[in-house]
Image (cartoon, helix red, strand yellow):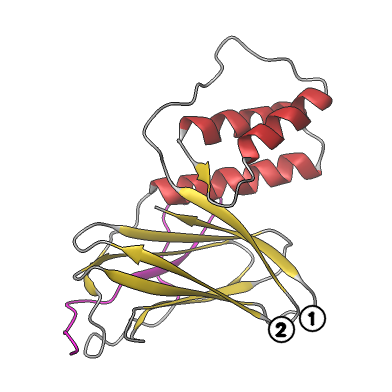
Amino acid sequence: MKHIAGAAVLGCVLALGGVGCAPTSEPVDPTPARSVDRPMAPRLAETDAVGAILQGGMAADARNDGEALYDMAQALIRMGAHSDDGTDLADVWLRRAHDLGVHDRTDVAFRGRTLGPGYRQGHIGAHGHFRTHQSFNAGQRAEIVLVPIDDAPLSLDVVDDEGAAICSVAPSTRNLGCRWVPSFTGTSDIDVNNDNDRDVSFYIVLN
C-alpha cells in the first residue's frame, strides 16, 4: 500500500564545510513516494561536518601536512564519529601525524561522548554501481553524505523500500547530501554511481 508524502526532500551538493547547500536536483514527485513527510532546511548537520572533516583529513594527508591531519583527527573524535567498517580514521590520522613529527597537545580530544555519525568506505569500478541499505526510523531526521575521494564525480540516489525515489543528486566531486524525515520506519537503498573511466573510492556518512 502506497502512502502519499507531503513534500520533496533536499538533495544537495555540499561545499567543504557544508554551509548553504542548495537543491541540485528536481523535486521528487510527492505522489508515489511514501517515506518523506517534510524536507529538512539547509544547515550544517553533523553528517555534513563529518563529511567536511573527512575531506579535510584526506587533503592534509595527501600534502603531508601533519599539523592539519592532527587537527582533523581531533575534530573527528570530538564529533563522536565512528567507523562502520573497522577502519578508525582518527587513529590512522593520529599515527600518520606522529610519523610526520607532530607531538600530542594538551588539548587532546577524548573519546566517550555519545556516538555521532557513522562512516564507511566504498569502492566502485569504472562505470560501476554501488548499493547499500540503511534503516531509518519514522519521525527522526535521516541524513546521508557522500564524500568522493579520488577527485572524480559521483552521483547519489536514494529510494525507499517500495522503490519510490527519495532524492537524486547529480554527479559532483564535492560532497553530496540527502536529508529527509521519514513518515514510516523502513529500509532505504543508497545508490552511488560512477560514470568515470576509472575506479573511484568514497566515504558514506550516515546519522
Residue in the image at 44% along x and 61% along y: 144
Which of 73 and 134 lies nearest the eye of the viewer? 134
Label 2: which secondary element: loop
Counting other residues with Cα less than 10 Å from the Cα at mark 2, is it few (<14), some (14-19), or many (20 or more)? few
Res 179 seen here: no
Q: Do the residues labelled 2 and 1 touch (CB within 8 Å)?
A: yes
Q: Does the magenta stretch include residue 75?
A: no
Residue 197 drawn above or below residue 85:
below
Looking at the picture, which amino acid does disc 1 mark?
Asp
Q: Kindly identify the residue that appears in the image at 77 percent across and 72 percent down.
A: 199
Asked which quadrant contains residue 150, the reply is bottom right
Direction from residue 194 to residue 115 in the image, left or right = left
x 61%, y 32%: residue:
73
Give the percent coordinates (x, y) of residue 11. Answer: 41, 70
Please state the horizontal and vertical placement of residue 185, each as a whole percent of the image: 24, 68
- Image-quadrant location for residue 203: bottom right
In the image shown, does 89 or 19 lie closer to the viewer? 89
Question: Which of the numbered marks, if any, corresponds to residue 58?
Answer: none
Side of 124 relative to 113 (left or right): right
Q: Quadrant of the N terminus?
A: bottom left
Is 115 drawn above or below residue 33 in the view shown? Answer: above
Task: Locate residue 191 relative to residue 93 in the image: left or right.
Answer: left
The residue that disc 2 covers is: 127
| Observer able to see residue 163 | yes
Badge 1: residue crowd in 10 Å (few <14, some 14–19, many ≥20)? few
Q: Give the range drawn in magenta.
A: 1-24
User: Which element is circle 1 on?
Assistant: loop
Q: Distance between the residues labelled 2 and 1?
A: 6 Å
Amino acid identity at mark 2 = His
Nearer-the-camera pick, 53 or 206: 206
Indicate which disc residue 197 carries.
Answer: 1
